[in-house]
Image (cartoon, rainbow, N blue to C red):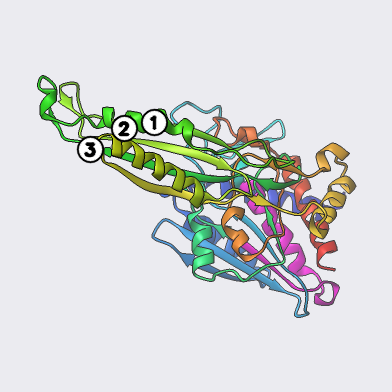
Amino acid sequence: MSRDQRSEIEECVQFLQEAVRCDTVSKVGDEHVLARMLAARMEQEGISCTIHTLDDKRANLIARVSSGRPGPCVVLSGHMDTVPVGSVAWQHGPFDAVIEDGKMYGRGTVDMKSGLVALMYALIRFARRPRDSWSGELILAATSTEETGAEGAKAMVANQQLPEFDALIIAEPTDTRLVIAHKGALWTRVCSCGKASHSSMPEMGINAINKLFPFYAGLSEVDISSDPHELLSPPTMAVTLINGGKQANVIPDRCEITLDMRTLPDQNHSSLMGQMRALAGRVSAADKDTNLEFETLLDVPAVSTDPGSDLVSIARQALLSAGASSDDARPRGAQYFTDASVLQALGKNIIVLGPGDPKLAHQVNEHVHVNDYIAVIDIYDEILKKYMA
């Protein structure tokens, strides 16, 4: 390894440490600090950067490099926010970015600052290349508040911060394996409105918990079945939150449940919502005192890329060339959703590929292997060289 290569690796590691030290917990941390840090590093290379403010805590960042020649538009994307650190003590401080035994510890090391920063360095490499050695435009899209509903990605699409693209690489943690499909998500809150009274006189009130229960019990009537997808498990529906009542001696005047549906690419979310509203209608018709209200909390569709696409083939070859096994390089699916659910409005050729074990995301003592982080920069570089030749 040359001195220049060692210096580049040291810089990449140090920059990731600084990124992890930025508290960007969704909606309470400051994403502007990280966005400015990323922009400053890229502007050193002459890369054009724009920070789009959502509010005083949240921001999107767009960086562009153009070859000046016609060719594909490729977007590299990762989110800047993280989930909270939790209440359980960490082995190392969650924002200290300590490196021990080849692993960097900290909130966001896996999900997903290592992937985001690796994409930035892949972009920087392209900015240094002669413009006649590649074609098209390369864009880094660093998004806000993905963890709470892909809000930054929605703003990118709604406000035309991104153009239509030919290919999108999302750097969510996949253990450096190739993901070409993932589930969608439909989160719905259903509220029962009743009338409060003293619990010693329940006949004077309308118990919102009791009125919501028939809807809860009838959810098995909602048909979430779908044709199978070769890379994804069947769709699921789960009640994940129940909230009702204020204290032991008060008949509750409000009760709500939250449902989380995970869907496949051929499922229509409007149809699923229609089934739930029809169930609510039947429950209300059977009891004039039942009043149910609906609120959609999140509605993002599933993603599925043609396994025979050039992007998928090139990514597989890049992984194999980097030493991945044929199993690790094969296309696979994921049960979670990513910003790709929203960004696919601008293009359908999408892969998810990033460093870090996804099982460590959102966990105490989250950590990424430094060698995996460095290696994925080379893999991104190889994919881009071939796709944008």
Q: Is residue 59 visible?
A: yes
| Residue 185 x, y percent position in the rendering | 53, 45
The amino acid at mark 3 is Lys
Mark found first going from the N terminus, 3 or 1 = 1
Above/below status of 219 relative to 271: above
Q: Residue 216 bears which disc, if any?
A: 1
Task: Please tell me in which quadrant of the rendered image residue 48 appears.
Answer: bottom right
Relative to the observer, which residue lies in front, 338 or 318? 338
Mark 2 crowdedness (10 Å alpha carbons): few <14, some 14-19, many ≥20 = many
- Residue at 78% over, 46% down: 375
Disc 2 versus disc 3: nearer the observer: 3
| Residue 84 x, y percent position in the rendering | 46, 39
Q: CA distance from mark 2 to mark 3?
A: 13 Å
Residue designated by label 3: 288
Residue designated by label 2: 212
Q: Is residue 131 magenta?
A: yes
Above/below status of 6 relative to 164: above
| Residue 359 x, y percent position in the rendering | 63, 32
- Residue at 10% over, 19% down: 200
SS at circle 1: helix
Relative to the observer, which residue lies in front, 234 or 66? 234
Mark found first going from the N terminus, 2 or 3 = 2
Q: Is residue 171 left or right of residue 178?
A: left
SS at circle 3: loop
Task: Please tell me in which quadrant of the rendered image residue 208 appears.
Answer: top left
The amino acid at mark 2 is Leu
Q: CA distance from mark 2 to mark 1?
A: 6 Å
The reply to whether the C-beta atoms of the residues labelled 2 and 1 are less than 8 Å apart is yes
- Residue at 64% over, 70% down: 164
Q: Which residues are magenta?
A: 113-141
Disc 3 versus disc 1: nearer the observer: 3
